Amino acid sequence: MKRLLSSLSYQSLRDGALYRLTGIFIVAMAVFGIVIGIASDETPCAGRLIADAPSVLWLFQYMIIAIIVGTLSAGDFKDKDLYYEIMSGHSRVDIFLSRAIPSTVLSALLAAFLSAVPVISNCIVFGWGDVIEVKGAVIRIALCFFPFLRLASFYTLTAFLSKNRMVVTALGYMAMICCIFLQNVITGSQSTFLLSSFNLQKLMDYGTWSIYNLDPAGGIVMYTAYDSSISKSMAAGTIMISVLVSAVYLLAGYGFFCKNDLD
Amino acid sequence: MDMLMFLIFAICILGFFLPSIRKKYDSSMWRLVYVAPLILAVLISIFIEFNIGYAGMYLAVILMLLVLFTEKTALKKIITAAAAVSVMVSIICIMVLNMGAGVGYTKDFEDAFAVMKQHYVLTEEKAIDWDSLYAKYHPLFEKAETENDGILNYKNWLQFTQEFYDGHVGYQASDQWLGEMADCEIFGNDYGLSLLRLTGGEYVAVNVEGSEKSLSILDYGEDYEYAKDHLSDNAQADRLQLLNAGIHNGTVITSWDGKSIEELQKEVDVYADAFPSKDNEEFYLSVYAAGKGADSVKIGFIDDSGMEKSVTAKKLGAYYPRMISTVKKLDNGVNISNLDMQSVDSDTALLRIYQMAYDTKSYEGADYTEMTEELRQKVLEYRDKGYKRLIIDLRRNGGGSPFMVGAVVQLFAPEGEHLISYSAVINEKTATYERGADGKYVKDKKMSYMGENLWDQGDIILLVNYETVSAGDMMTSLMSEYPNVTIMGFTGSNSSCQAVTSYSIKSGGITFSAVPNLGEDGEMIIDTRADRVRGVPIDHVIPLTGEAITAIFDKGEDYLLDYAANY
């Protein structure tokens, strides 16, 4: 498997399209972070970006992970590399893992990094502010890696089912659209870990308390406080459920791949 | 939800027979049958509820998926049968045994309790013991959850919120139908009358079924669909039972199922509204007591000839509609537009204010210049016409903006600057109001107004009742200091004035006092303290007499307005 991994790594590292794509994603997310700050009604700062537009930090990754996983896991079905590997004596488990592990881990890492990009760009331009504590925000963003891992594993499963990276990319697009829709439907849902999007939404949902005060000149003036701390049960649940579900997806993917008659 | 679970059960049964059917009609589409429970379960989880209480259903989903991985017919049948049994067990547990339905009543309480404990601003003043409240109510909400009893949950909330004796602490069920159902179940049975305690101490029948101006069970409309659907079988036949026995509005009631009315009142354990001041609660207590009893009650009364008699009155339905109707008949103000003025008699003008709101723009701010100018012209018009007395009708004024209060009362206040209240210093980082070293909230910005004394040619009477609350309370309190103002009513105003906020929970929402309004001394203004003595004075308590009962409940007159005009 080591040789397969190194050859796939070599192939990926020389794939200019992936580099360009990653670069575009980073720039786009950085621009998002700054534009949202400029458009803010209140004094912009990175803490406010996190508090007011949390979905920006995770929503686009649904599509981004799909593209990366689709390319790394399903790309070789088209150019028949995968078939040559089978014919040259590599076991199916090696072939599966040499694609599944790097595509899930790398895409999840990249997605988690991309979650931080708009915050960093906004912070560079506008500063951090005092809306949210840095430590809590960092922990929450870091924890996003796990639901992203779960999502990437799901895409890996679909990559081996469909053998077509365009299908995986389309699925990513659909998933992103569904998340936008579901965000409004599931507000207040108790089902924190049911879907990766629920989990991400809960991770980015900072406890808030809003109250007003009476001002002789301004009338009703609103104040909002955010609680950036995260409960141990939330953190542990995120990690355990994500790892468990990721394993189930990958096992299902492998189960299908090892029994599948390849053309 | 239950129907969808039955649907999943039906699909499991279909899956059981599918291997046999497939032999006749071979198609790969049959596989969808085994995937369908998954799709349904996901849809249920997303759009309705994900709850561990439906574990049987989730297990069935997994079992049905496993069928896709086996080719053996016998094994398929065993797995699908197990899935069907699993769903059925889930259905029985939830529908028959009320187990693990997971309605979230306890979590609702825990969430709301935590927020209130942190942000309720009258904890010290009202001596709220949070730990004992939690110890008392947490088991009750757990019971409601275990028994999946929405009505008990509703009653728990009413009782819990009334522990604060604060007109701003309340609960509203998100399911209106459940709310009406619970109100009808909680407040007892309707025997065709309400009770009121006259100032002289006697208890009299009011709003008697069949009297011309009384509420009739025949007239239940959209507001009381549940009550309409749950009238007793005998309701039509027995609705005139009290009139036929000689009980009418004003008849003195001496006993209720062998108990005195004072004893009966002790059975009242929940109200529809909060009564911060004790005297207001005492005034309305007998209204609530008239719902107590089983399928029939033996009512002792004194007939028109002075003879003591009794009648066994059968239950007609739910008491809640009559109870609310009685309270409204007592409390309703003049039915004209907000801030409208009209003539009562040649000497007396009326200004009606039922809410402290003018328009959306001004409500969010503090500028009521336009409203003040409009009202100023009206007041001057009546003053110039020679009216001597002005009655300001604040009955059932549910409150609103304190800035509007200032903008109204400035017209009538003696010349000079007058304080409305101080806001409190807020910790912007935590959005909480914190107390200083002396235990008081720290005064921040001063809200005041300049008096114009436009009605200096005569007196002003403020008509109030317990439903005059919040900014209504504030206006009453401010005007009580003017030399030409008399505050009157059957009861005083509510005595709840700290600004309110709301908090949503799964089963509805709660409101509570969360923004302090402070006086010159830094104390919270108006609200009752632990002793439940009113915070807003009442200058003249209008006696509730037989004459008042006849005027209100038989003739449909505005007794209080007439009383004030002739005072």
Image: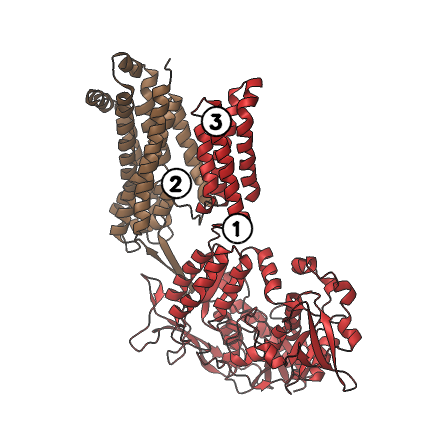
- Please tell me which residue is depicted at 59% across the width and 85% down the height of the picture: B541
Question: Pointer 1: what residue?
Answer: B97
Kind of element beneath mark 3: helix
Location of residue B245 (image quadrant): bottom right
Badge 2: residue crowd in 10 Å (few <14, some 14–19, many ≥20): many
The tint chain B carries is: red
Mark in the foreground, 1 or 2: 1
Q: Residue A121, percent across and down?
A: 27, 43
Location of residue A175 (image quadrant): top left
Closer-to-camera residue (B542/A104): A104
Question: Pointer 2: what residue?
Answer: A197
Q: Amino acid at mark 2?
A: Ser
The tint chain A carries is: brown
Classify the position of the C terminus of chain B by image quarter. bottom right
Classify the position of the N terminus of chain B by image quarter. top right
Q: Chain of mark 3?
A: B
Give how far apart the Cα atoms at labels 1 and 2 are: 34 Å
Q: Residue A218, percent across and down?
A: 42, 64
Q: Chain of mark 1?
A: B
Give how far apart the Cα atoms at labels 3 and 2 are: 34 Å
